Amino acid sequence: MSETAAVPFVLDTLRPGAKGRILSGMRPTGKLHLGNWVGALHNWVELQESYENFHMVADWHALTTSPEASARTVENTHDMVLDWVAAGIDPAKSPMFVQSHVKEHAELHLLFSMIVTKARLERNPTLKDQVKDLGMEESTISYGHLGYACLQAADILLYRANVVPVGEDQLPHIEITREIARRFNHLYAADAPVFPEPEGRLTKFPRLRGLDGNRMSKSVGNTILLSDSPDEILARVKTAFTDPKKIRKNDPGDPAGCAVFEYHRLFNPDEAPAIDRACRAGELGCVDDKKHLATLMAERLAPIRERRAKLAKDPDFVRDVLATGAKRARAEARATMERVRAAMGMGGGGTDGL
């Protein structure tokens, strides 16, 4: 399906020239790593030139699996937003805001929870993967965790977004969002649909493995942060997983199972074919290869690292960005909820008429 075919109406507040609207979000987990950049952030930066973007700090989502995370939300949000802007998100073009600062997210989530079934949420493969990764018993899943995809649908549709840049593990959530939009329109707005059916947009590298070859996670310590110094990058790359059968430099290697080569494909695509051949022929040692990769990565990340350091000198920068973004987000959220209530025959918001 094309980018525009899924939208049966014109989004009426788009900036001139924009193809459509995007809602993107991340949980506030602090400083971002390469997996965040490859799986989402790089895509966000590119798409803001042709789409109208809203970027959300998903603080309520963080509580679905870690209720205690609220104690770290402010600090983690500050670090994450610094990385967003340093990586190229322009606050003037792409409003950034905290999810809990726009209360309409909760209202729309409540309404959507009335039209999605428990069975559908339980079939969500992303939920199943999370439960498995966290070592949870199904009986311990919270109501909020089960309804994670419903809340995400509210986040996306509150801004009538028609494109959502995501990692591949989030595609099932986008499908649930499409189903909820379709169900709402069928029940309440068949003649004049309120919501589009958004499409997921993957990057070329929708998922990047950690340095140990497993799923990238800061809790495991197999990441490289966008803000890491060249020395820190080198130290981390030295720990990267390579072909265990390649012990000496002249041993033939298999780049297909090597985390270092996967990073070369991302940061050094022009040299990657030659590195592949040299590794297989036993002409390239892993130690030298890692040093070369670390140098390239440090150079590539230098603009982000330097911008971040400059922005961090202003203690009010992140607060001001989020305050301005929240104001713009609330205006869109209020407009959507007026449409929702009108379609449902529920009248205006607040206590009028009670």
Image (cartoon, helix red, strand yellow):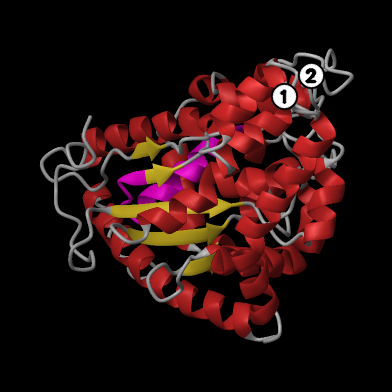
Tag count: 2
Q: Judge whether 49 appears above or below 310 on screen.
A: above
Residue in front for this viewpoint, 273 or 43: 273
Q: Is residue 147 visible?
A: no
Report if the CB atoms under discs 1 and 2 are less than 8 Å apart.
yes
Figure quadrant of residue 229: bottom right
Q: Which residue is mark 2?
A: 243
Quarter of the image for the C terminus: give it.
bottom left
Q: Is residue 132 visible?
A: yes
Q: CA distance from mark 1 to mark 2?
A: 6 Å
Q: Is residue 204 left or right of residue 131?
A: left
Chain-order first, disc 1 or disc 2: 2
Q: Position of residue 226 (x, y in %)?
A: 68, 57
Is 162 magenta? The answer is yes
Q: Position of residue 275 (x, y in %)?
A: 63, 29
Figure quadrant of residue 29: bottom right
- Magenta range is 146-163
Q: Position of residue 82 (x, y in %)?
A: 63, 69
Quarter of the image for the N terminus: give it.
top left
* Residue at point 48%, 27% (across, down): 172
Residue in front for this viewpoint, 250 or 314: 250
The amino acid type, in three-letter code, at marker 2 is Asp
* Residue at point 73%, 69% (across, down): 74
* Residue at point 48%, 65% (across, down): 89
Q: Which residue is mark 1?
A: 258
